[in-house]
């Protein structure tokens, strides 16, 4: 397999950064949500995890098929500082990747954020924004918090900054209120375009901000009322996934315990692709594939350092109980030049059980959606399966 494609930081045209506009784009507010959007069969399926106890259910959330494969959080704050112009602005970012064998490109337009000093600066969504999105997706699994409005093709969650901060703290990520608000600003002002090209060279694309809409209160208000209601409208690909049932339950607490973005990305890939996890059918992953599709190894100038980072990420997933073992095989060519590394992954018993439960839940959900009968397969009160 060919080596990973290099992430390109540059303008869409002629490699020049997109110009800063005199009036930065404003976020879109969440329109009023109808009451029936908080309780309907498809939302029940999204919120109804298959688990035996309340503690097990509390550990679960949903991974979204295409959306969680997009390398949308692949630029670190350190790398951002390297890419910024002297005026503080960032270029448009192009990130090639593959999904189910199809070549796609994610084009990220950074958010323009006004600092406390009144100066504007650009930001790509990064590690902090990633964990905030995961925490909000977890909160959306609660009754009367998450919503799904099929008629308006939208989904999201209503929450308070206090509840979001508490959720983050419980998962080991303590953020100040102003940091949470800045993360929400970046997610609601950064846009991402996913482009696919067919055999004839024609392009199809989907474009939206990471959060399609955000409603909240101004700084002076949230400083005095942390319980004020906020609302986020998820990216259209999340809404599409809820509609088409292309999501999977997974161990959210394990993901939030990951120390690096690379570990989180790898875990998401295992959840979404290693669906028939078994000790007799191990899963193979190539270094070149991770480099190409994650965008998280492009900052390493030396391949050996990137491979070391990948080795460390697999070791972390072993520590966190997702993997039982990892075999590493180097592929070398002429003059013993390293061409690729193949990792053979052996799942833990816990991960196999989690994937089996996710498969069982998906099967029940598909049957329930097809029948749309009065009885759904999960008891949301206790989170237990039938």
Image (cartoon, rainbow, N blue to C red):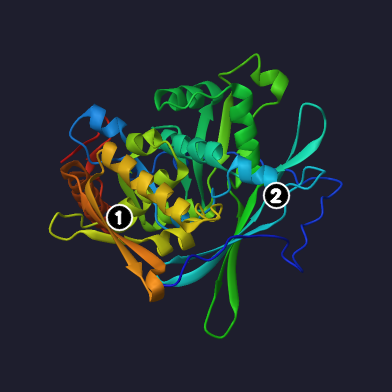
The location of residue 322, given as percent across then percent down, is 26, 43
Residue designated by label 2? 83
Quarter placement of the N terminus: bottom left
x and y percentages locating residue 141 in the rendered image = 38, 37
Horizontal relation, residue 49 to residue 216: left or right? left
Q: Quick check: 341 left or right of 14?
A: left
Name the residue tied to disc 1.
369
| Residue 93 visible in the snapshot | yes
In-front residue for pair 225/344: 344
Counting the numbered discs, the total is 2
Q: Which residue occupies 44% across, 38% down?
A: 38
Position in image of residue 166 (x %, y %)? 46, 22
Frontmost residue, 380 versus 91: 91
Q: Secondary structure at mark 2?
A: helix
Q: In this rendering, does residue 124 appear at all?
A: no
- The single residue placed furthest to the left in the displayed view is 280
Q: Residue furthest bottom?
A: 200
What's the distance in space between the residues labelled 2 and 1, CA to CA? 47 Å
């Amino acid at each position: 397999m060919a080596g990973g494609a290099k992430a390109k930081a540059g303008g869409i045209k002629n490699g020049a950064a997109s110009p800063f506009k005199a009036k930065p784009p404003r976020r879109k507010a969440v329109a009023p949500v109808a009451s029936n959007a908080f309780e309907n069969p498809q939302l029940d399926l999204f919120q109804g995890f298959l688990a035996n106890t309340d503690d097990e259910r509390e550990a679960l959330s949903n991974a979204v098929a295409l959306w969680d494969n997009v390398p949308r959080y692949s630029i670190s704050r350190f790398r951002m500082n390297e890419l910024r112009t002297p005026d503080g602005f960032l270029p448009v970012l192009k990130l090639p990747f593959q999904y189910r064998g199809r070549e796609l490109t994610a084009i990220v337009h950074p958010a323009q954020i006004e600092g406390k000093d009144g100066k504007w600066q650009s930001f790509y969504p990064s590690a902090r924004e990633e964990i905030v999105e995961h925490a909000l997706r977890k909160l959306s699994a609660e009754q009367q918090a998450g919503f799904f409005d099929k008629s308006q093709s939208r989904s999201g969650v209503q929450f308070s900054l206090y509840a979001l901060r508490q959720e983050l703290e419980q998962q080991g990520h303590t953020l100040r209120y102003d940091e949470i608000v800045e993360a929400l600003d970046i997610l609601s002002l950064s846009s991402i375009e996913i482009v696919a090209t067919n055999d004839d060279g024609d392009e199809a694309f989907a474009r939206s901000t990471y959060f399609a809409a955000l409603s909240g209160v101004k700084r002076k208000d949230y400083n005095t009322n942390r319980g004020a209601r906020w609302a986020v409208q998820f990216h259209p690909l999340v809404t599409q996934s809820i509609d088409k049932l292309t999501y999977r339950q997974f161990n959210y607490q394990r993901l939030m315990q990951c120390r690096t973005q690379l570990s989180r990305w790898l875990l998401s890939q295992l959840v979404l692709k290693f669906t028939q996890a078994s000790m007799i059918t191990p899963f193979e992953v190539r270094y070149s594939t991770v480099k190409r599709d994650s965008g998280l190894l492009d900052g390493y100038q030396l391949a050996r350092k990137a491979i070391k980072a990948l080795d460390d990420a697999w070791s972390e997933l072993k520590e966190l109980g997702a993997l039982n073992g990892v075999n590493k095989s180097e592929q070398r060519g002429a003059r013993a030049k390293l061409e690729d590394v193949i990792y053979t992954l052996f799942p833990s018993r816990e991960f196999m059980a989690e994937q089996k439960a996710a498969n069982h839940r998906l099967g029940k959900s598909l049957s329930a959606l097809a029948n749309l009968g009065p009885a759904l397969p999960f008891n949301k009160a206790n989170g237990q399966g039938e």
